[in-house]
Structures are given as structure tokens and as C-alpha cells.
Amino acid sequence: MRTLSLGSVLLIAWLLLSGHFEPMMIGFGIASCVVVVIITLRMEVIDHEGHPIHLSWGALTYWPWLMAEIVKANWDVAKRVLAPTPDISPTMVRVHASQKSDLGQVIYANSITLTPGTISVDVGDGVILVHSLTRAGARSLEEGEMDRRVTRMTGEHH
């Protein structure tokens, strides 16, 4: 099932990104996708973490929320940095990651890094070390909304 899903996702991405719909070009796209799927099968990386199709439905609600958070954080960082006297207070904070799987913790850490003004520095043992441009950004992470949403998306309950 994951193999078929990976091949389909690759082919759809190839079609959308290439913009070529001539039979010969589609044939090349299919051949390319088949080669990639064969390579990933040989590497044994089409698994629960390598191709997490089980997250598809949860991602439909998580991604729009994350995109909105990224836009808000971009606006906040831009205002702070472009101000005549930048209002920044760089700080490091450790936030608890309630996800039980490595995949869940990586999604959480990457979500933190994707949000401007925060960078995940280290992940391990259910704790993420984060550098934040402001103390307010650090407090926002400590409130745990992103953690709860990632946990809900991955289906990992406390």
C-alpha cells in the first residue's frame, strides 16, 4: 500500500511540477517514478516514518493552522527587526514534546523551526531545546498549542 501511495504521490508531483502532458514526457515521468520507488524499496525506507500516509487526514487540519502561524510569526519578526530600535530578547528554552514517536517529535521540532523567530537546536528524550528571538515567542511555545496540535495530528495521545 505504501509503495503504491509513494508512486502515486511522486507521479502527481512530477506532473504538477513539470507541466508536460505529452505522452512521451508522461512516459519519462512514470519511468522516473518507478526507478525512484525501486530504489526506495531496495533501501527499505518505505515505512511508517519514511512515507507516513497515516498522517494524511490529520495533516489536512494541521498544515493550514501551521501556515497561519508562520504568516503571523513572519509579520511579528518583520515588525521587530525593522523597528527603529529592534525589540528582541534572544533566549533559549526547553519545551516538552508530548509525542511518543521519533516521527512526532521531529514533526514538532521542524514545525518550531519553520515558524520564524524560533529554531529547534536539539531534540531528545521528549525535550526540544529552542532558540527564540523573543521571550514572548518562547512563552508561546511553552503554552503548548503547537505541541497539542502535532500530538493530535500524529494520533499520539498522552
Image (cartoon, rainbow, N blue to C red):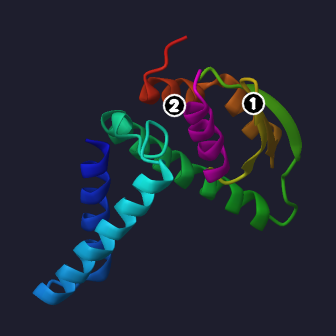
* Residue 88 locus on image (x, y percent): 85, 51
Instruction: Report the side of 13 relative to 78 (left or right).
Output: left
Res. 24 visible in picture: yes
Q: Which residues are magenta?
A: 100-114
Q: Amino acid at mark 1?
A: Arg
In front of the other: 125 or 111: 125
**Among the 4 quarters of the image, the one containing residue 52:** top left
The reply, left or right, for residue 104 in relation to residue 84 is left
Which quadrant does the C terminus fall into?
top right
**Image position, residue 39 (x, y; %):** 43, 62
Q: Position of residue 8 (x, y in %)?
A: 24, 58
User: Which secondary structure, mark 2?
Assistant: helix
Tell me the quadrant of the picture where the N terminus can be found. top left
Disc 1 target residue: 139
In the image: residue 60, left or right of residue 46? left
Q: Is residue 154 above or below residue 85?
A: above
Identify the main secondary structure in magenta.
helix
Identity of the residue drawn at 35% across and 60% down: 37
Residue at which label 2 appears: 150
- As drawn, the residue found furthest toward the left would be 23
Q: Nearer the viewer, residue 123 or 23?
A: 23
Could you tell me the amino acid type at mark 2?
Answer: Val
- What residue appears at the point 66 percent right and 40 percent down from the top-left corner? 109
Query: Would you place residue 116 above or below residue 142 in this image?
Result: below
In the depicted structure, whether residue 55 falls above or below residue 24: above
Check residue 107 for magenta coloring.
Answer: yes
Q: Earlier in the sequence, mark 2 or mark 1?
A: 1
